[in-house]
Amino acid sequence: MTVSDAEIYKSLQMNQGMADASEFRTGGVKILFLGNSITIHPVMPEIGWNHEWGMAADTAEQDYVHLVSRGIERATGRPADVRIRNLASFERGFRDYDFMKNRDLIDFQAEYLVVALGENVAALQTAEERLEFRNAFRKLLECFLSGKRKPHTVVRGVFWPNVWKDEILSWVSANLDLTFVKADIAGDKNMLALGKFEHEGVQNHPGNRGMAEIASRILAGFFPFSAA
């Protein structure tokens, strides 16, 4: 039986509905975040999650999406026009995923793209299965790289340490000439939201310190010679 890291960390019941959020600012620097519950999760009272931002930050402003957006604003001197989408459906169904369901985000033509996926992918056992995921992940990225202007892109490695997933994400990133940053920091309990929620799965998500560390690594990927 194959399981995902989300199941191992008691987070299997999350990401059941796609969360989609936007911050519309005409003329702003266009930023797109593709991720899972760590990126954005809708309200789910049955697990004690009553917010709609990156699980499990204390406030929206403390999740990595908002921290990265503010960092890009500082670096560019422009307000952020942000799109955020939970693509756990891709992680769990990459073999028959309808890539064009994200046509609106493709047409958005982001200038900065953050891709933070992988935690919900099952524990693929064979080389053939992993190749399927690698090809699907590449196809997903290519959907957002095919416009007139290639976005500055950072692919974030998985939060819960997993060597083969990071190897695939890193390989695809290098093959497409994109920046990959490791984020396998969940082994440090200080990075988790332990004690803040009753549900073990929510607690295993990044707390404020974890979110800040993820944001710092992503911003360093975008601006390696800057203190963004």
Image: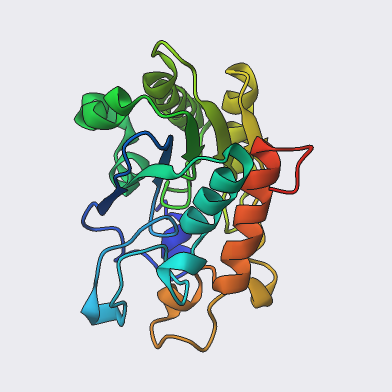
* Residue situated in front as seen by the camera: 137 or 148: 148
The answer to whether 221 appears left or right of 87 in the picture is right
Q: Residue furthest right?
A: 225
Residue at image x 23%, y 26%? 103
Q: Position of residue 18 (x, y in %)?
A: 23, 51
Residue at image x 56%, y 37%? 155
Q: Position of residue 115 (x, y in %)?
A: 48, 39
The answer to whether 109 appears left or right of 216 in the picture is left
* Residue situated in front as seen by the camera: 36 or 6: 36
Q: Is residue 228 above or below residue 137?
A: below
Q: Is residue 5 above or below residue 104?
A: below
Residue 189, picture quadrant? bottom right
Residue 25, picture quadrant? top left
Q: Is residue 60 above or below residue 116?
A: below
Q: Position of residue 71 (x, y in %)?
A: 59, 50
Q: Is residue 2 above or below residue 135?
A: below
Camera sees residue 222: yes
Q: Position of residue 75 (x, y in %)?
A: 63, 42
Camera sees residue 182: no
The answer to whether 49 appears left or right of 211 in the picture is left
Residue 49, picture quadrant? bottom left
Residue at image x 60%, y 45%? 157
* Numbered label tally: 0
The colour style of the image is rainbow
